[in-house]
Image (cartoon, coloured by chain):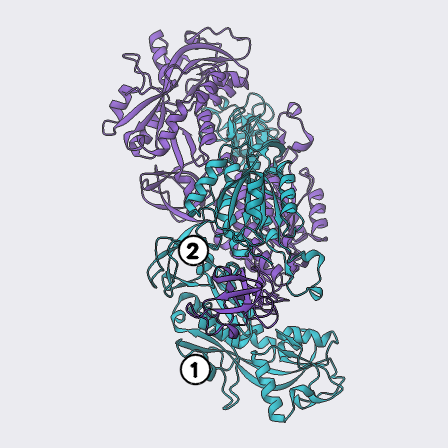
Chain colours: A cyan, B purple
Amino acid sequence: MSIRRNIYLNMKTLKQARQILFERFSLSQPLLKETISVPDAVGRVLAEPVFAVISSPNFHLAAMDGIAVTAATTFGASETRPKELVVDTDAFYINTGHVMPENTDAVIMIEHVNDMGQGRVEIEAPAFPWQNVRKVGEDIVATELLFPHNHVVTPYCVGALLSGGVFRVPVMKKPKVLVIPTGSELVDWRKTSLETLKPGQVLETNSFVLGKLIESWGGSFVRHEMLTDVPEIIKQAILDAVNTDFDMVLTVGGSSAGSEDYTRNVIDDLGRVLVHGVTIMPGKPLIIGAIKDKPIFGIPGYPVSAIIAFEQFVGPLLSLMLGQPEKQRPTVPVEPTKKIASKLGVEEFLRVKLGAVGNRIVATPLPRGAGCITTLTQADGIIRVPNNIEGLPPHEPVTAELLRPLSSIKNTVVVVGSHDNTLDILADQIRFGHKNLTLSSSHVGSMGGLMAIKKGVCHLAGSHLLDTQDGSYNISYVKKYLPDVRVKLVNLVLRDQGLIVLPGNPKAINGIEDLGRKDITFINRQAGSGTRILLDFRLAQLGIEPSWVSGYENEEFTHMSVAVAVLSGTVDVALGIYAAAKALNLDFIPVVTEQYDLIIPEIFYESENIRILLDTINSPEFKKRVQALGGYSTEKTGQIII
Amino acid sequence: MSIRRNIYLNMKTLKQARQILFERFSLSQPLLKETISVPDAVGRVLAEPVFAVISSPNFHLAAMDGIAVTAATTFGASETRPKELVVDTDAFYINTGHVMPENTDAVIMIEHVNDMGQGRVEIEAPAFPWQNVRKVGEDIVATELLFPHNHVVTPYCVGALLSGGVFRVPVMKKPKVLVIPTGSELVDWRKTSLETLKPGQVLETNSFVLGKLIESWGGSFVRHEMLTDVPEIIKQAILDAVNTDFDMVLTVGGSSAGSEDYTRNVIDDLGRVLVHGVTIMPGKPLIIGAIKDKPIFGIPGYPVSAIIAFEQFVGPLLSLMLGQPEKQRPTVPVEPTKKIASKLGVEEFLRVKLGAVGNRIVATPLPRGAGCITTLTQADGIIRVPNNIEGLPPHEPVTAELLRPLSSIKNTVVVVGSHDNTLDILADQIRFGHKNLTLSSSHVGSMGGLMAIKKGVCHLAGSHLLDTQDGSYNISYVKKYLPDVRVKLVNLVLRDQGLIVLPGNPKAINGIEDLGRKDITFINRQAGSGTRILLDFRLAQLGIEPSWVSGYENEEFTHMSVAVAVLSGTVDVALGIYAAAKALNLDFIPVVTEQYDLIIPEIFYESENIRILLDTINSPEFKKRVQALGGYSTEKTGQIII
């Protein structure tokens, strides 16, 4: 096997590369037009200015319920000298929205009309001309410009267009983009089962992400079948695309400078490489090319690189083609929670978690690997570290682009840790009183919660970690695993843990001691969960080896999952909370009452959101709902443990 | 015909009505779930937390192109004492993304490998364990929580889900909403030609607007055929809907308190009316009801009322059903350009045009009629005038909700003043070349434009004010009314003003001198408009008293409106521009050629936006389009007058 060293062709900065791209394609062929029905045009871009065909209203209409009159006939009416009108001669009963009878020019509100019977009405004030009348063209005048070209049709526009007698509109065809995933290691998830996945096979995901991004930027997306790293095959696929009606081609993978990175040479053969390599991170191995006046992108294969390359180049080019301004994310000043190192000469797109602490927004960097898509899915924002500086100092404001609305970031309490059903009650109870405050909880077990606190990626963690030395909960774990974080520990609930069995307890299970029985199968909770620690402790106390417990090695992540396994007959017994058993009408054999606490770092403890959360925990309504569940005690609920 | 007075049932404030709605339905039946493929789930709400099935990467992978080695075998290598390795025994060539060979734990980058030939390579530095290796689970660990329930799936999420081996996800079914348009006057645009539209027939548009709003708030929409105002028929349609799988029903129209407003009684018969009438404007005649635990809304029939009612009640309820926080529009402080009157006890949703002038954002109110959908399509923002105050003073900051991004508002040139059709051409032509720049024009007459310049609430004004002393245009007015503002005056067009009459000129009108005739009715333009000044000047020249002109006191605000009055037969003659007559196929008797100029304060004259505008005015493309309209001359177009 030989290695051919491929060198980047004169790397460009982000700004230079964007300029090259936009200048090259700003004057290319405009998109084709298509004419579609108005409701279908929502979200589409008008290809021509659109003018009203009819006026709205199209006739003079009554704007009130009442009588239509000719104003002149009412002059002189007063309280002292009311005027009588003859119905269907001088006065015509009319409802809102109905056409004014001929020769009438005003409506008197029904409240101001005295029905005298026998076809006569009386009024006590004159009408002035055109009062309570919607005149022809009040909203839209025939022939007026409704929307200029390049206007994006909104739901509101549908009303104006249809009212103006415009039922179909010319819109720009969506730019059609072909995405070609390349790489011999790739497999299609739609044709694969996870069980048969071989070592080295990788699920191809980029094309689906890029496809959805293309759609959200106004394009249409076709996925080419995956191609192996054979230049001739890739070349033919690109050639077929530029010779048909595709407006743009993205190849994914193979854009770097390694031995199997053929994309640059392929584009060079077919057209021209404009840029190879951009000084950004992630996203460096990007290729921009032109074949027959059509843009071709070699998109890097790491998922975050692919997305950054898309958002900086492909998406903005789609906007340009559609006559739209470039999308801009809202920005906010944030304070990094720690020093952020960076490389001179490289512009970095750093993914960060944001949290409102006091009146600051603090930013915690997420891992920087271009291969980790979760650094984008977990991010609230992106800090751009410019290429002319070496790192950002902590606590000095920098600008972050927002991936979620600031209001949502400010109104989210992030809970990570052990699962308990009362967290759902708490979330619900909080939203009941504070509609915009959200509790976002992730269930990763008690130890997982402690680690999340340590990384600064949550506001609080739920935990029920038993100290098998002294029978206390959580305190010793906090001291051991969070020596550098000052935290408060607040009790949420006391709860019963016990064995969950089918109704009537058919296998006659009495306690943990029965788990070693040969005729019983068990399902376990994951390592690091408080329930697992409790089980292991009790097994050790009883002298039962884990290997004697049939099913010990099968793990589930929540109380509900193990209860479902019992209900479905997959296993005979599980260890879990009463609430889970009750929810599925299963029997429950109590084993222990344990303490479930919230671990709250002191920097968040005084915040408004945590105050609301603690107030809710201390409220009688919350405690009442918890008690109604059964299997819980609220006698320590809200108590500050440390 | 008899009128039955229906009285609102204990009107509620916005806040009260929302509270009643959300409390009634916060604990209703949860939405059903459905399981769909991950790419299809973009934009949908997860109905359950989703956990990873496999890790990503699923095997140890090379993170660089190079050689895979066992770190321990490289220890001791240095520049002075390089170490030789045997290919395919101690060292394995590997590309980025490929699986690490068994028993290797590090990758040395290809740049640091010397190929010695004959199956041997040399390295000058040791590798440390796991360098340049993406370990199993670096991105995602099997069984970890990927996304909590209620999470909205984004394109990024697609990457994380597929990488974690999750190919299908449980999402909440879209709330299914039936929209029933009611009203005997309605016609379906899909089954109508404009030519056959009869007096009093109205195109039904609300259901299509509401449908698109429902979709954009996450629901699915079914449109019921239109129903006439017969209570039994409406009742049956609602009953059919609540007995099937609809989650919500909207009836449109008939929600007020008039003789044909049956909705309240229908809901009362089938279930319970919770609210009838909310103290908001537009949107007052709203009904909120519950039938069999399902929400029913009686939506007002005026288009703006319908939209406000939707956005304040229906949309937020959809969000609540989907476990989402309520959508919040971004807000910005703005300065009203004039005093805004308002009614105590009513919360008004005032549509405004916004413009960045200097470093302030100024807000100009649009017409307030609930029947005018264009007040929403033209609006940049909404000012909420609270119910406990009477009006807003001018120039004091208030909060506006943004309907367009602030960046787009900042790229808008605000024109206030006299109306001319070539402004529409100019707006369109500017967007053609400069997709980020918008021209927004408000029509308040020439004097109104001068006042807007004086108050600093626009970037430029269109004006055609005749100096009756010397026959010049605009210069003397600018000197008189804007003594303290340095402005430039640039000609836009010369245009013909004349009398607009029905085709064939049935009343044989020859000139302004005929306006005094007894058999002729006229419609005027508003005081302060250039056309009005021209009329008054010519009447005075001819010795005709305004009181001799029948209809002199009836004013309209645009050329098109007076032309429509002629077309509809309301009046016999109007004074206006040729373009208005031509658009409606009316006859035109030229009276004068006048000069229409743009007044531009010098502080804006040098700005980039105005430069683009002036370049466009001077372009042959713009002049050509103006000439094609007829009734215009471009011989002075673009000339700087002062």
Circle 2 Cα neighbour tier, 10 Å, few/some/many (<14 / 14–19 / ≥20): many
Q: Nearer the viewer, residue A177 or B216?
A: A177
Q: Is residue B401 above or below residue B491?
A: below
What's the residue at 30%, 34% (across, down)?
A: B455
* Residue A372 visible in the picture: no
Residue occupying the point 44% across, 10% down? B590
Vertical placement of residue B86 versus B421, above or below: below
Looking at the rendered image, the quarter that the C terminus of chain B falls into is top left
**A307 horizontally vs A243: left or right:** left
Q: Quadrant of residue A550?
A: bottom right
Mark 1 lies on a secondary structure that is: helix
Chain for mark 2?
A
Label 2 secondary element: strand
Q: Which residue is mark 2?
A: A348
Query: Front-most of A347 and B130?
Result: B130
Query: Where is mark 1, residue-wise?
Result: A479
Specify the amino acid type for callout 1: Lys
Q: Give the residue type that dot 2 points to.
A: Glu
Query: How many numbered marks does the figure carry?
Result: 2
